Amino acid sequence: MSTPALDALAAAGLRHQVVEHGPVRSLDEAAAALGVAVPDVVKTLVVRRGDDDYLFVLVPGDRVISWPRLRALLGVNRLSLPDADTARAVTGYERGAITPFGATTRWPVVADERIRGRTITLGTGRHGTAVLVEADAAVAALAATLADITDPAA
C-alpha cells in the first residue's frame, strides 16, 4: 500500500508501522483497534489563521484544543476550523484521515507537548489505517512547535 503520507514518512526516514484497523466510530474504538491508549491516538486538526493560511495541530485523543493558548502561541486574535470540503482542498485528505505527512501543502505544525516521548498513531491519508510512530521523531521531521495547547476533553 502506498499513500502520499506513507511515502512522506519513508522519505523522511521515519520508522513506522502501518496498522490496518478498519472502520471505527470513536476514539475509544480506534485506540482498542490499534492496541494503544486513547492519548496515543493523535488527532490532526486543520486550523485556519486567515485567507489561505492554515496549520496542522496535533492533539492527543483525550484532549481538545485550548483556543486561548493556541491563539496566544500564534499571536493571533482569531482562529477557526474549516469545513470538511475546505480541509480536504487545503490538505488533500478527508477528515478522519488527515495527517501533516504528504499533505498537498506543507503547512506549519503545532503539537501538544504531551505527545513528547510517546509512541503515537497518526492518519495515513486513508480511512481504516494508521501509523505507529515515535512522536519525537515525527515532531522533528515536521519541524513542529511543541507547546501546551490543549485541555482535557470534557
Image: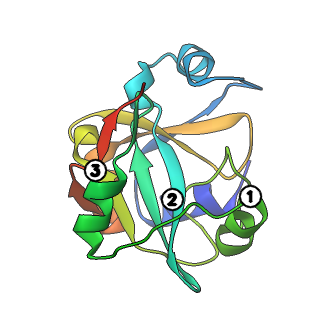
Q: In the image, which is nearer the foreground, mark 3 or mark 2? A: 3
**Of the numbered discs in the image, which one, if any, rests on residue 132?**
none
Q: Residue at x 21, y 54 (%)?
A: 147
> Three-letter amino acid code at disc 1?
Ala
Residue 43 x %, y %: 50, 43
Q: Residues within 10 Å of mark 2 (few under 14, many from 20)?
A: few
> Three-letter amino acid code at disc 3?
Ile
> Three-letter amino acid code at disc 2?
Ala
Q: In the image, which is nearer the foreground, mark 1 or mark 2? A: 1
How many angstroms separate mark 3 from mark 2 (CA)?
28 Å
Q: Residue at x 57, y 24 (%)?
A: 27
Q: Residue under label 2, please give it.
A: 10
Left/right placement of residue 97 relative to residue 116 reads right
Q: Residues within 10 Å of mark 1 (few under 14, many from 20)?
A: few
Give the camera-side residue of 139 and 3.
139
Q: Residue under label 1, please give it.
A: 84
Which badge, 3 or 2, comes first in the chain's sequence? 2
**Residue that protrudes farthest toward the bottom in the picture:** 51
Q: Secondary structure at mark 1?
A: helix
Left/right placement of residue 65 relative to residue 80 reads left
Identify the image quadrant of residue 154.
top left
Q: Residue at x 36, y 54 (%)?
A: 67
Q: Residue at x 74, y 72 (%)?
A: 89
Q: Secondary structure at mark 2?
A: helix
Residue 104 x %, y %: 64, 75
Mark 2 and mark 3 in contact (Cβ < 8 Å)? no
Which badge, 1 or 3, comes first in the chain's sequence? 1
